[in-house]
Amino acid sequence: MSETYDADVIIAGAGMAGATLALALKQGGLTPILIDPIIFDAQLAPTFDGRSSAVAFASFRQWRTLGLAADIEPHAQRIEQILVTDGRSPGASAGNPSPFYLRFDSAEIADRSDGEPLGYLLENRRSRAALAKAIAKAGITVLAPARVASVDFEPNCARVTLEDGRVLTAPLVVGAEGRNSVVRAAAKINAIGWDYPQTGVVATVKLSRPHEGVAHEFFLPGGPFAILPLTDDRASLVWTETTAKAAALKTARPEIFHAHMQRRFGAFLGEANVEGPVFTYPLSLQLAERLCAPRVALLGDAAHGIHPIAGQGLNLGLKGAAALAEVLVDASRLGEDIGSELVLQRYARWRSFDNTMLAAATDVFVRLFSNDNPLLRLVRGAGMSVVNRIGPARRFFMHDAGGASGDLPRLLRGEAL
């Protein structure tokens, strides 16, 4: 790092993608600074974020390579099977299979994934805690609570002004602070997208029967209803409803919420009891028109925010962190200017197509499956049934969902930078 800069890379946003990028850059010999309006301790509180995330096995390899294994593996639930059912009530998972379902099994791709599961389910607060511990251990500077007020892009550096008046400089600033990114706006990078007339209702439940590492997703008329396995025979419930119904569920008395949940849940996993608060999250799609500009790169939700129907939102951010870190570390070792558009375009070329295709695919899935149109139900059901009968197609989808297809960054292959 030159003495004229405060850091090699200033990262606005210390969420999971931003923190992962900081650790990867530090491993590669660069000096990052993280800025976030919320201190890490507050991000770890059970009331801060009730969500759990499906972490692809390739993304999990990255976290292991960055030294998080001891702190995440005890809390990570292996996903051994995924059962996807189209219907008005539980089907394939309830012991009375509908002809319209998909079954993915990790054993089918064990020879290609080194015995990894289809993915891991991990509560966001556990991931954040592991990242916070690793950030502290690595000696990475974290400015929090602090908020970016403005960014000025000069020929040789980015000048970041915080709301408290502090000014920081670096060859590069990364916007990883979410959908309302100040960095993205300062770089005059537009975002396109739209809101869905849906809200995600999220809760953690304790099951009276073992889930055996099976994730269930039901495509119901109001939207997808997912039961995602957690450790200790708990599950993360992701219940997509119309905005009005979700608001009513959020404010319903516990016994009313339980009655609605249990009716939607079905009986195949026995009684389910809510543990902790119920959270609601409005759902939308947002995609930045570009991933970079001179002296700036976008990462995570600042670059792409997608519907959770495929459970790939976090993995897109973690893939982006791995790719951006590799591009910057390799450029630094060659003596290149890491904030130049020439360098940053390598990152954009690597990740733009994947981001756009996944965003488009999730949008199509939402529109295709969140309805009760008889003709569409027949078409999508027949399509699921066909894929379920074609082994190579199933294995391709599993390998792709595991994040192990395409041109993988070294960290996603489990290799240090």
Image (cartoon, grey):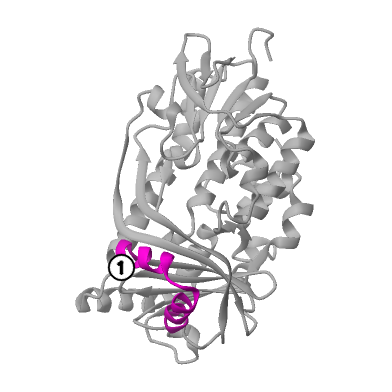
Residue 252 lies in the magenta-colored region: yes
Q: Residue at x 60, y 68 (%)?
A: 109
- SS of the residue at dot 1? loop
The magenta segment is 241-264
In the image, 69: left or right of 237? right
Q: Is residue 98 above or below residue 402?
A: below
Q: Quadrant of the N terminus?
A: top right
Q: Is residue 236 above or below residue 131?
A: below
Residue 20 can be seen, yes or no: yes
Q: Position of residue 297 (x, y in %)?
A: 48, 28
Mark 1: few/some/many CA within 10 Å (<14, 14-19, 20+): some
Q: Position of residue 107 (x, y in %)?
A: 63, 73
Q: Which residue is mark 1?
A: 370
Residue 21 lies in the magenta-colored region: no
Q: Position of residue 139 (x, y in %)?
A: 77, 30
Residue projecting furthest to the bottom = 96
In the image, 130: left or right of 301? right
In the image, 207: left or right of 397? right
Q: Is 246 in front, or is 386? A: 246
Q: Residue at x 60, y 41 (%)?
A: 409
Q: Position of residue 293 (x, y in %)?
A: 42, 23
Q: Quadrant of residue 261?
A: bottom left
Q: Amino acid at mark 1?
A: Ser
